[in-house]
Amino acid sequence: MSISSQIGSTMQRSSWIRRMFDQGIELKQKYGETNVFDFTLGNPSMEPPREFKEALIAAATDPRPGLHRYMPNAGLPEVRSAIAESVSREHGIHLTARHVVMTTGAACALNVALKALLDSGDEVITLAPYFVEYLFYVPNHGGVNRIAETRSDFGLDLEAIAEALGPRTKALILNSPNNPTGVIYPEEDLKRLNDLLAGHERNTGRPVYVIHDDPYRRLIYDGHKEASSLKIFDHGIFCTSHAKDISIPGERIGYLAVRPDAADADALMDACAFTIRVLGFVNAPALMQRVVAGIQHVTVDVEVYRRKRDLLLDALLEIGYRCVRPQGAFYLFPESPIPDDVAFTRSLMEHRVMAVPGSGFGRQGHFRLAYCVEDSTIQGSLAGFKAAFDQAQRLTQS
């Protein structure tokens, strides 16, 4: 076999999300775009805000020379200063440009942090259900995944996290608002988690870094708030992108910020500036850095996503599905009406509704729906959701 055996094995276990998305494309080619109702990919249907397009035009037409040349690996100093000022304001903790690395999206930020932190055999705790790619990012850098389950309502289970902690634990990946559930972890739970990790550090002499993957921070509903991980966690690393809050996933721009008094923070910043280069990113795109620097206050109309959430969730609940109401992001994670979530998503597909099995996110018996779609997709899907549910009910009763 020509390709790496490790990559070949990983490809066999690769993302359910992309697999179902590709199958959705095949169905659309067969039945027509408007006759297939695809909830597989968190690909925002909303266009970027006006301010983004204005900033893009201004940056692209800026006549100053040298704007597209190489720069420091960590990013343009003036952009990092602008980001640091915005993060300081939002999180209530003082950062400077020194504490920020501009990245090619949140996935880049996560891999840069993991590459900087992990020695071979170091362990990273991931909370289930989780974003699928975490399980691949950690081994990329010699790490070992340790899975800790959340509760039935997807809240933090501190006992499960305590059991996952070990002498080689180096980091914990936190995703709130969560993909796939939309749950936000309460501030008090996060503080208790920090106390748990601090106790572990006292016992082992090893700090545990909390890497917060947070691209949905500004997509929050119903008056809920998200606490600042940088302020709460002694060794906090904040990773985000503008893929979701201003609807530019294809532009791949985000950043990583480190709490200034985290363990070995200066060395960690130097390491991140190095790893972004050796991982092949070199630096985040110059044009996009300049675009987002001045629009940190801009977000898409969150009310649009809240309305889509309610439109789909209320309809599913009326049919008979059970689902925790999301507090943020743009995903539903309903229970499958039969234990086999893969079989149920196949049943949905027979009715031209595309969903992703919960097994792919580490929680069987559920399925994920990305409701960042057109209203017509939601409305057109409801008959298929009901038909699949009724079919499942007949199977369980027979």
Image (tube, rainbow, N blue to C red):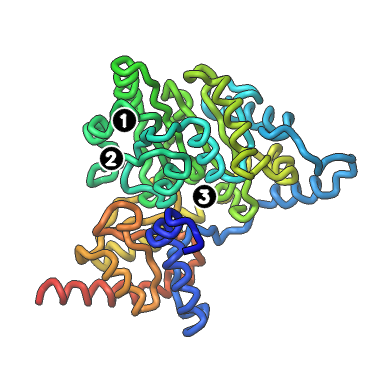
Could you tell me the amino acid type at mark 1?
A: Asp
- Residue 386 on image: x %, y %: 29, 73
As helix, strand or loop, the secondary structure at mark 3 comes to helix
As helix, strand or loop, the secondary structure at mark 1 comes to helix
Q: Nearer the viewer, residue 84 or 171?
A: 171
Looking at the picture, does residue 379 appear above or below residue 87?
below
Measured Cα–Cα span from mark 2 to mark 1: 15 Å
Mark number, residue 189: 1
Q: Residue at x 43, y 21 (%)?
A: 234
Q: Residue furthest left?
A: 398
Could you tell me the amino acid type at mark 3?
A: Val
- Residue corresponding to mark 2: 148
Looking at the picture, does residue 336 appear above or below residue 331?
below
Q: Residue at x 32, y 69 (%)?
A: 345
Could you tell me the amino acid type at mark 2?
A: Ala
- Residue 138 on image: x %, y %: 43, 42
Residue 82: which quarter of the image? Answer: top right
Measured Cα–Cα span from mark 3 to mark 1: 25 Å
- Residue corresponding to mark 3: 302
Q: Nearer the viewer, residue 300 or 266?
A: 266
- Of labels 3 and 1, earlier in sequence is 1
